[in-house]
Amino acid sequence: MEKKNLDWGSLGFGYVPTDKRYVSNWKNGAWDEGGLIDDPTVHISECAGILHYCQEIFEGLKAYTTKDGSIVTFRPDLNAERMMDSARRMEMPPFPKERFLAAVDEVVRANAAWVPPYGSGATLYIRPYMFATGIVIGVKPATEYQFRILVTPVGPYFKGGAKPITICVSDFDRAAPRGTGHIKAGLNYAMSLHANVTAHAAGFDENLFLDPGTRTYIEETGGANFIFITKDGTLVTPKSDSILPSITRRSIVYVAEHLLGMKVEHRKVALSELHDFAEAGLCGTAAVISPVGRVVNGEEVITFPAGMEQMGPVTKKLYDTLTGIQMGTVEAPEGWIRRIL
């Protein structure tokens, strides 16, 4: 298939309209058949529930062109399951897992010319999302919903290589105790915007959010989970009921333990422990792993031994192995790669 005539290496992480998107509607207690459409515009009532009570959830995953020329997705079953969990928490009708997977396949296949070629560093970002379209004026769940999937080609998150970032301990809370921090709802990200703008204005790349109950334990950033490497090479990931269960983080943990033979700990991580770690990173769909070189907590500055010049050696090995699985140069664990074309 002939690819679009784009300068793939110059793409940023932004929106480029593609040919097709997928839409299905929930009405009278059931999802309709759904299908592909051309129109990128969403048409809803001024009284739609999304506009008044923020009933909205979403997912993020990518399609890749592998070394052998196949177009694949990475663990989309976990995205489907997480979106179903998010829907239940937001009193929305879950979009069935098998339909989710089939819809992702369909929209990627229809936009195959937009999937960047192997070796370009670019990928096709896939954004499934669902929102309340039913009319509501009182505070209650809507009775009608729309599920959509858009896709857009995006460039490499790091142009010229991943450089360690500097983050700050935020004065704000990302999520409430027993709230919605563990689901992928738009309202959680809205809550992080002011904190992000404040951090960027102060010269920092990202925030480190603490647990909202005691403000002593590390949780995540506004859009990524943390990973830490101890000085003896153990992978540590923070544990909390209000952390989003990142698919990238879960995959890194498996790679570390089962492919690289590392010791792994998933536990509460105190802010006071930062001095004990050799490397740190943020993990998520967009960048896979963003290395963290320095954390600033008020007057205290903590620089990890891996430094500010390059990704730490253990983090680099995790990154290379996981991206190799995604691109088809490293053998994938069973069920991780879904071939579309």
Image (cartoon, rainbow, N blue to C red):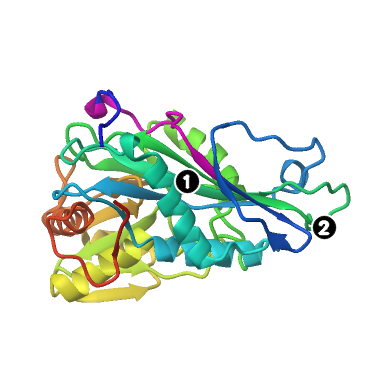
Amino acid at circle 1? Arg
Helix, strand or loop at mark 1: strand
Q: Is residue 104 left or right of residue 43?
A: left
Specify the segment rendered in magenta. 8-22
| Residue 57 appears in the rendering | yes
Q: Is residue 44 left or right of residue 175?
A: right
Residue on which the image places disc 1: 127
> Residue 140: which disc?
2
Helix, strand or loop at mark 2: loop
Query: In the image, residue 21 lies at what x, y percent?
Result: 51, 40
The residue carrying pointer 1 sits among few (fewer than 14), some (14 to 19) or many (20 or more) residues within 10 Å by Cα, namely some
| Residue 170 appears in the rendering | no
**Furthest residue to the right?**
138
Q: Quadrant of the N terminus?
A: top left
Compared to residue 251, the image places residue 301 above or below, namely above
Verify whether residue 214 appears in magenta.
no
